[in-house]
Image: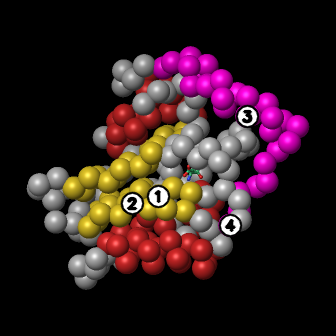
Amino acid sequence: TLDAGAVAGVRRVKNVIRLARRVMESPHTLLIAQGAEIFADQVGIPLIDNNELKTPELIKQWQTYQTNPPPLPSAEYIPPHCDTVGCVAVDCHGNIAAGTSTGGMDFKPVGRVGDSPIIGAGVYADNLFGGASATGWGESITRVVLAKFAVDSLQGNRDPHPAARDAIEMLARRVGGTGGIILADRL
Ligand code: ASP
């Protein structure tokens, strides 16, 4: 139904998709950082200690990066610990939903937001055509608004397999980007 909700830059929310859903049900589409956490509190989503989200492996890796920073993401280099989770679902009534959740990219600067919470870039759903969830180098995905591009290209009852392939090829061709996409068409 083109309803959409997202959060970005949150540090104390364990299940961010639950919070994004509550944003979708609110008058807003995107809440960030402290404002998103205040909203979480208001709607009864528990805030956790940020330390609960840290793993020994990632702390160790971050310490290594302090002295030996990874190259910036590019067509040639994607950091090894992308952790995006994506889904697209179509129910028996033809309702389509998509979700994308991520910790972002390794060693990102504070305040960096990738494609995942940007509606149309990392996630998009439209009951008329389909739904999409993207992963990969977020800055490149945002530049081409990849998820909406892929969903729009389903118009005319196009098969989602070649449509998804074309979207990823377009990402590479237009901005030298790399990524992947889940794309589902309507019933
Ligand atoms: N797309 C995400 C970002 O750029 C990373 C990922 O897919 O894992 O933040």
The residue carrying pointer 2 sits among few (fewer than 14), some (14 to 19) or many (20 or more) residues within 10 Å by Cα, namely some
Q: CA distance from mark 1 to mark 2?
A: 6 Å
Residue at 56% of width from left, 25% of height from top?
A: 53
Q: How many marks?
A: 4
Q: Is mark 2 within 8 Å of ligand 1?
A: no
First in residue order: circle 1 vs circle 4: 4
First in residue order: circle 3 vs circle 4: 3
In this image, 64 relative to 90: left or right?
right
First in residue order: circle 2 vs circle 3: 3
Q: Is residue 64 visible?
A: yes
First in residue order: circle 2 vs circle 4: 4
Residue 186 versus residue 85 in the image, above or below: below
- Does the magenta segment cover residue 59? yes
- Residue assigned mark 3: 61
Q: Which mark is residue 75?
A: 4
- Residue assigned mark 1: 134
Q: Position of residue 186 (x, y in %)?
A: 21, 66
Q: What's under tag 2, amino acid-wise?
A: Ile
Residue range in magenta is: 47-75
**Helix, strand or loop under label 1:** strand
State if disc 2 and disc 1 touch (CB < 8 Å).
Answer: yes
Q: What's under tag 1, amino acid-wise?
A: Ala
State if disc 4 and disc 1 touch (CB < 8 Å).
Answer: no
Q: Is residue 30 visible?
A: no
Q: CA distance from mark 2 to mark 4?
A: 20 Å
Q: What's under tag 3, amino acid-wise?
A: Gln
Q: Nearer the viewer, residue 98 or 7?
A: 98
- Residue assigned mark 2: 182
- Does the magenta segment cover residue 160? no
Residue at 88% of width from left, 37% of height from top?
A: 67
